[in-house]
């Protein structure tokens, strides 16, 4: 029944650690053609990451925009194509933000996440919502599915963390088997932080003497947040269903840019987000598999600027989303199948802003995909039709937009004995301008065109395993790609973080290389060393207009070189983790001139943990030191990042 | 071999990584235009680049007209004031010279910076929230500010004008004016302030506040037109004020006011020209205007001269050179007080370097230089006596 009976995606550590991992739903997954980058729960636990955004820094091809601090907004960008080209799925259903297209990944906890997977192009599977065929890249976040040891009906995990910036985080996960086929899980988390941290700006004269050197404390970065999530998982004969309720509430200060003579600001934001989603997957007979998905989301954002020196703002935004999807896969032959999927999505944005047009968007997605699974070659071809129509309170609403976006994926395994595969894909995708891009009362530009992207990718992947000896597992994958983005819409921060200047920047040509490698070693008994290395090269040129002063210059905030390294040493109950992140030189504006130049930054984070037992409970204590060398850096100009900071975590599993 | 592959890979990758070096302040760039200087009373020109909000990229440039050839010194502030934390600041909004002092109003840094006019070395600063423009009279500087007390029935506060002693650089007095005051003019014991009401969109202010400088009290509010901005005095004692309009059905405009015996101005002429900013020299008012053409989906630009005595548009083209057509976003104009050669500032797309273009008095193009982000405000430096 497996479409892709390819080499299994084994958990690399399993063969060594003999962990019992049960894949409840793997039987119903139609595997993707092109493998991806994955961070599993095990690895995530060892990284001293606070949120999903922090973890994504370890994927190649990803650039994180981080405004600093616990509550600072964090968004990601894939292969220089911009945040809005990246689809982010939470348990199989896309997270949306029709208002600004930016999912603040800082709002999602790693606490109950089992796996984060990054796909370039799209997830090249068949059984997925139609809109999943439309992204230029996608991140799939999968939360932990309840699983129980024999003669156990309940799992409980409690965690507490204290860290710099007066951060306290308490979380809990409770999993319960309700009936032999139905289980539930409840995850909740509370977070509070003052957001205060020291930062330093120091500049030198050309002769090496200090021009100025000042250390200050970041203000107005305080946050409290509550997150709760409830899940029901049900097994069926030849299928399953899932139901989720998610709610997130927070109130935070937006620290704002540090500029001459201004060291604190008064912007604040309160979020009350809620969504509920359900998913049902069923095999109907020998050949047909179907999936149905439904979601309703309500996001309430209250933004206030109490800075008396600026325009006072007090605005509320209410976003709603309604989403239905049906996906159907039919297996014509054991090696040939096809899928037909349809999604409907409705978005609405209300605001008390003056002269706000209250846009509504109706999106229809229809996809047709087919896949071949031959012994050495796997292929997928898909075409997606997207039809979008906006309605606004103005008499004349924008015209509807219909786009067709095809994609082809091929994976070739030349040898039977070697785990080497060569893959390639070509894909067209586009993104609609967001409601903010189009209708924001004083900044929106209703004339913005959709932004389209063409991608060509060629890559290889090689795995090797040894049963004995020092080296146990080696994996390398590398991809070279060429993207071109047309009518690119670029957002620049404009004082207030929530507001932007919109530009149809035009045309960008992107050439890049992603490399990712992993190595597992067992130097002596009980000692396990794993290394993970990731490198990204991106050459992203603005080729809009030869008369521009920035023609052929690297686009803002894209470093040519970036990468990360993780080394993990595990000895009995001890675990030491070192992670290094590097972002090379880049420019903060379109022109590559010295006034816009930004130095490379690199941080080293260390964590040490020990596992032990208290009665029958598995406990763990973790100490972490982040930015060990206390580097002073900005990811975004004038948004200083924290210097060295510390944390301690205590976990208990019953 | 395979086993060392990983090590080799690490080493290869590490080669790409460049390390940080000590960050230096940004030093100025000296660009020789090669154009021979025409000697006059004017020895130079300071140009203030606004920089985008939050970027802290307000920079000061200097056009040196004292040497053999014209030199452009780009971004001189940091080098002249290396100890100033985070340099000049965020969004410059006005630059003026008073005696030996160079005054710069840095809007989003909430300060007025006072430097020596000879070399732009800092003398002091005055903290004024959301400050906009500066003008001078009798040893005092007057600075308009968007921020005053919040009045009932309006979410936005009224504006203020602060009086500053130019010797001590201390605030000595203040006066509440209309909403979001912009440019000011002092004449015969009165101060006239153009109120915009920009924070009260769509209910803009439409008045000029008249302040008695002796009492520092608002005497009158004279209704002119929506969203007033630039206000200048000509040699006949007339006030010229530009209106930004409401960006919807009401277009920008230019008005001329006569000041009566009592000191109260009355509107005498509505020019019906879309003016963004202007500069008055002798009897000529040089203007430019930018508007948006909804049908063509592009900016429309006007450049021209108005005779301030006859109140007639003398010409609607300042120059016939293609260089004028290439200007994407005219954002400032300044005319040589004697020779009538003029400079136009092009802010391009606001997020990249602008240009300063020099035209001879007959409108022919002379040269252009690259500026900082959003060149918008300039002031001539005269030969010191």
Image (cartoon, rainbow, N blue to C red):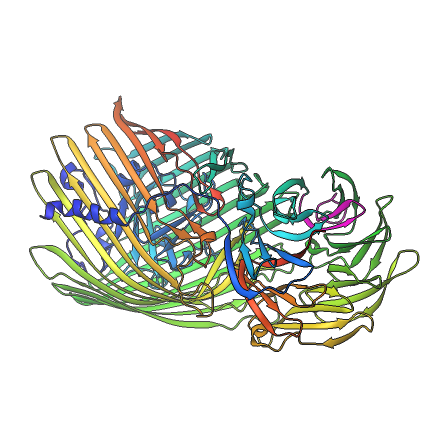
Q: Specify whether residue A140 is in view.
A: yes
Q: Farthest residue toward the front?
A: B68
Q: Quadrant of the C terminus of chain A?
A: top left
Please check the rendered image and state whether residue B66 is part of the magenta-colored stretch, yes or no.
Answer: no
Left of B253 or right of it: where is A437?
A: left
| Residue A445 position (above or below residue A152) | below
Relative image position of residue A593 (x, y in whole percent):
44, 56
Relative image position of residue B110 (x, y in whole percent):
64, 44
The quarter of the picture where residue A488 lies is bottom left
Relative image position of residue B222 (x, y in whole percent):
84, 58
Left of A261 or right of it: where is A152?
A: left
Q: Which residue is at a point 47% across and 33% down the rendered structure image?
A: A197
| Residue A412 position (above or below residue A474) | below
Please check the rendered image and state whether residue B153 is part of the magenta-colored stretch, yes or no.
Answer: yes
Q: Which residues are magenta?
A: B129-155
Q: Specify whether residue A30 is in view.
A: no
- B214 or B361, which is in the foreground? B361
Q: Farthest residue toward the right?
A: B261
Q: Quadrant of the N terminus of chain A?
A: bottom left
- A70 or A637, which is in the foreground? A637
- B382 or A590, which is in the foreground? B382
Relative image position of residue A252 (x, y in whole percent):
53, 40
How many marks the image carries: the answer is: 0
| Residue B130 position (above or below residue A17) | below
The quarter of the picture where residue A246 lies is top left
- A274 or A431, which is in the foreground? A431
């Amino acid at each position: 029944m497996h479409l892709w009976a390819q080499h299994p995606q084994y958990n690399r550590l399993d063969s060594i650690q003999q962990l019992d991992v049960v894949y409840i739903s793997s039987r119903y997954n139609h595997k993707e053609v092109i493998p991806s980058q994955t961070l599993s729960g095990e690895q995530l636990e060892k990284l001293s990451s606070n949120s999903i955004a922090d973890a994504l820094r370890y994927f190649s091809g990803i650039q994180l925009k981080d405004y600093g601090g616990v509550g600072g907004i964090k968004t990601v960008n894939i292969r220089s194509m911009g945040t809005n080209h990246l689809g982010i799925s939470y348990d199989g259903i896309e997270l949306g933000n029709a208002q600004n297209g930016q999912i603040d990944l800082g709002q999602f906890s790693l606490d109950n996440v089992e796996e984060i997977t990054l796909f370039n192009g799209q997830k090249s599977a068949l059984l997925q919502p139609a809109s999943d065929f439309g992204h230029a890249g996608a991140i799939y976040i999968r939360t932990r599915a309840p699983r129980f040891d024999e003669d156990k009906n309940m799992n409980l995990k409690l965690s507490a963390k204290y860290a710099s910036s007066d951060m306290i985080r308490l979380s809990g996960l409770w999993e319960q088997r309700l009936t032999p086929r139905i289980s539930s899980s409840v995850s909740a988390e509370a977070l509070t932080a003052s957001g205060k941290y020291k930062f330093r700006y120091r500049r030198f004269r050309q002769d090496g003497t200090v021009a100025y050197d000042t250390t200050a404390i970041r203000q107005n970065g305080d946050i409290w947040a509550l997150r709760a999530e409830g899940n029901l998982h049900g097994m069926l004969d030849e299928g399953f269903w899932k139901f989720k309720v998610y709610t997130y509430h927070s109130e935070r200060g937006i620290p704002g840019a540090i500029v001459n003579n201004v060291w604190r600001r008064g912007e604040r934001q309160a979020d009350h987000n809620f969504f509920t989603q359900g998913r049902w997957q069923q095999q109907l007979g020998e050949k047909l598999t179907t999936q149905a998905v439904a979601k309703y989301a309500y996001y309430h954002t209250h933004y206030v600027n109490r800075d008396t020196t600026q325009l006072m703002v007090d605005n509320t935004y209410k976003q709603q989303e309604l989403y239905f999807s049906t996906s159907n896969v039919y297996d014509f032959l054991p090696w040939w199948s096809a899928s037909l999927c349809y999604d409907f999505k409705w978005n609405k944005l209300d605001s008390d802003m003056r002269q706000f047009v209250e846009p509504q968007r109706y999106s229809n997605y229809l996809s047709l995909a087919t896949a071949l699974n031959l012994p050495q070659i796997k292929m997928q071809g898909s075409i997606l039709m997207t039809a979008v129509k906006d309605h606004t309170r103005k008499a004349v609403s924008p015209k509807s937009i219909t786009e067709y976006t095809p994609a082809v994926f091929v994976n070739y395994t030349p040898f039977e004995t070697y785990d080497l595969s060569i893959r390639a894909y070509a894909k067209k995708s586009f993104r609609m301008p967001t409601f903010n891009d189009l209708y924001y009362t004083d900044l929106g530009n209703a004339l913005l065109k959709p932004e389209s992207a063409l991608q060509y990718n060629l890559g290889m992947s090689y795995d090797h395993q040894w049963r004995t000896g020092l080296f146990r597992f080696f994996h390398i994958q590398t991809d070279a790609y060429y993207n071109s983005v047309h009518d690119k819409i670029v957002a620049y921060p404009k004082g207030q973080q929530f507001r932007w200047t919109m530009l149809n920047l035009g045309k960008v040509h992107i050439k890049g290389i992603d490399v990712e490698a992993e190595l597992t070693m067992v130097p002596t008994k009980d000692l396990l060393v794993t290394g993970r290395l990731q490198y990204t090269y991106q050459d992203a040129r603005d080729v809009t207009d030869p008369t521009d002063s920035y023609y052929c210059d690297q686009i803002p905030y894209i470093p040519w070189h970036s990468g990360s390294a993780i080394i993990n040493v595990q000895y009995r109950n001890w675990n030491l983790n070192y992670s290094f992140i590097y972002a090379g030189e880049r420019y903060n504006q379109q022109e590559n001139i010295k006034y816009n130049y930004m130095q490379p930054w690199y941080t080293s984070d260390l964590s040490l943990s020990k596992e032990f037992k208290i009665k029958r409970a598995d406990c763990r204590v973790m100490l972490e030191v982040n930015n060990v060398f206390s580097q002073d850096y900005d990811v975004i100009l004038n948004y200083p990042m924290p210097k060295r900071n510390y944390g301690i975590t205590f976990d208990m599993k019953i | 071999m395979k086993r060392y592959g990983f090590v080799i890979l690490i080493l290869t990758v590490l080669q790409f990584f460049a390390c940080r070096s000590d960050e230096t302040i940004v030093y100025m760039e000296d660009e020789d235009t090669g154009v021979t200087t025409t000697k006059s009373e004017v020895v130079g020109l300071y140009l203030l680049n606004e920089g985008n909000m939050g970027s802290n990229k307000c920079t000061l440039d200097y056009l040196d007209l004292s040497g053999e050839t014209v030199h452009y010194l780009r971004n001189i502030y940091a080098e002249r004031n290396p100890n100033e934390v985070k340099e000049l600041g965020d969004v410059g909004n006005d630059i003026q010279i008073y005696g030996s002092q160079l005054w710069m109003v840095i809007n989003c840094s909430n300060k007025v910076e006072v430097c020596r006019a000879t070399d732009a070395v800092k003398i002091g600063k005055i903290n004024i929230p959301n400050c906009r423009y500066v003008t001078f009279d009798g040893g005092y500087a007057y600075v308009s500010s968007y921020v005053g007390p919040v009045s009932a029935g309006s979410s936005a506060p009224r504006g203020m004008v602060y009086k500053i002693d130019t010797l001590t650089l201390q605030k000595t007095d203040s006066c509440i004016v209309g909403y979001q005051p912009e440019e000011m003019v002092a004449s015969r014991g009165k101060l006239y302030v153009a109120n915009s009401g920009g924070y009260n969109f769509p209910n803009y202010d439409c008045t000029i506040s008249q302040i008695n400088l002796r009492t520092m009290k608002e005497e009158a509010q004279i209704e002119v037109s929506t969203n007033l901005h630039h206000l200048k005095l000509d040699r006949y004692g007339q006030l010229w004020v530009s209106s930004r309009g409401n960006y919807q059905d009401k277009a920008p405009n230019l008005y001329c006011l006569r000041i009566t015996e009592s000191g109260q101005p009355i509107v005498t002429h509505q020019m019906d020209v879309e003016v963004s900013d202007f500069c008055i020299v002798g009897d000529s008012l040089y203007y430019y205007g930018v508007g948006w053409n909804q049908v063509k989906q592009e900016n429309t630009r006007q450049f021209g001269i108005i005779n301030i005595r006859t109140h007639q548009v003398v010409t609607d083209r300042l120059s016939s050179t293609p260089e004028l057509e290439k200007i994407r976003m005219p954002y400032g104009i300044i005319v040589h007080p004697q020779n009538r050669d003029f400079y136009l500032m092009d802010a391009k797309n606001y997020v990249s370097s602008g240009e300063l273009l020099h035209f001879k008095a007959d409108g022919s193009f002379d040269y252009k230089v690259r500026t900082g982000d959003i060149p918008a405000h300039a002031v001539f430096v005269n030969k010191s006596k």
